[in-house]
Each structure stands twice: as C-alpha cells, then as structure tokens.
Image (tube, helix red, strand yellow):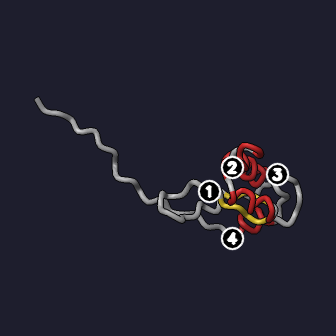
Amino acid sequence: MSQIAHTRPPAQKVRRVESKKYIAWVRDQPSVISGQHGCDPHHIISVGDGRMGSKASDLLTIPLTHAEHNELHHDARQWESRHGSQWQHVAATLARYVAEGLG
C-alpha cells in the first residue's frame, strides 16, 4: 500500500511593495493613537517574509508620533494591549487612503 506524503509547497518569496507616495501621505496624517501631527511612518513589525530584519511592505504602514513609535518598538505586545492591533490600524489607515480617492 502506498502512502501519500503531505508536504507543504515551497514558500514563495513575497515582493515588498515600496511606495514613496503612500509613505509621504502617511507622514502627513495625524497619529492613529493621539491624533497629533508630525508623524513617523511605522512599518508594522512581526511580519515580512520571515527573514530576520525584513521590513514590511510600505502599504503596511501607520502614522505614529515619534514617542508612540519608540514605545511600540520597545514593547510591541504591551503597545498593542493598550492601543489595539497594528493590523487594525493598518486597515483603518488604508481605508482612509482609499476614501480620499488616492488608492
């Protein structure tokens, strides 16, 4: 009797999307946390193509003040427990971009 091997297909390399236009737009938006202006575009962490130190796509970016950005990088779990999932903020940021007719 033959056995069927269950193997996962090889992982495909995901091409990172880069968009200077989108990053500039994110930089001009108010912080998703405090509503303050003068933001850093934060590429969400704990994602990417699995390589150590790989940066997420520019489309996975949210506006944060410099202090909020530093806080998130210091302890992402604690930041998310206080402010919500980075993914939720990405979805809201992308929705605002599309609603403004830019995407």
Q: Which mark is residue 86?
A: 2
Q: Which residue is mark 4?
A: 20
Front residue of 12 and 68: 68
Q: Position of residue 101 (x, y in %)?
A: 77, 55
Rounded to the nearest whole Å, what is the CA distance between mark 4 and mark 3?
Answer: 23 Å
Q: Which mark is residue 81?
A: none
Rounded to the nearest whole Å, what is the CA distance between mark 2 and mark 3?
Answer: 11 Å
Front residue of 3 and 73: 73
Q: Which residue is mark 3?
A: 33
Tell which circle, 2 or 1, labels the residue nearer the N-terminal end: 1
CB under 8 Å between discs 2 and 1: yes
Q: Position of residue 100 (x, y in %)?
A: 80, 54
Q: Position of residue 102 (x, y in %)?
A: 75, 58
* Kind of residue at disc 1: Ile
Q: Quadrant of the C terminus?
A: bottom right
Q: Answer left or right for 47 relative to 67.
A: left
Q: Could you tell me which secondary element the residue under label 1 belongs to?
A: loop
Q: Quadrant of the N terminus?
A: top left
Rounded to the nearest whole Å, what is the CA distance between mark 1 and mark 4?
Answer: 19 Å
Front residue of 56 and 21: 56
* Kind of residue at disc 4: Lys
Give the mark toward the camera: 1 or 4. 1
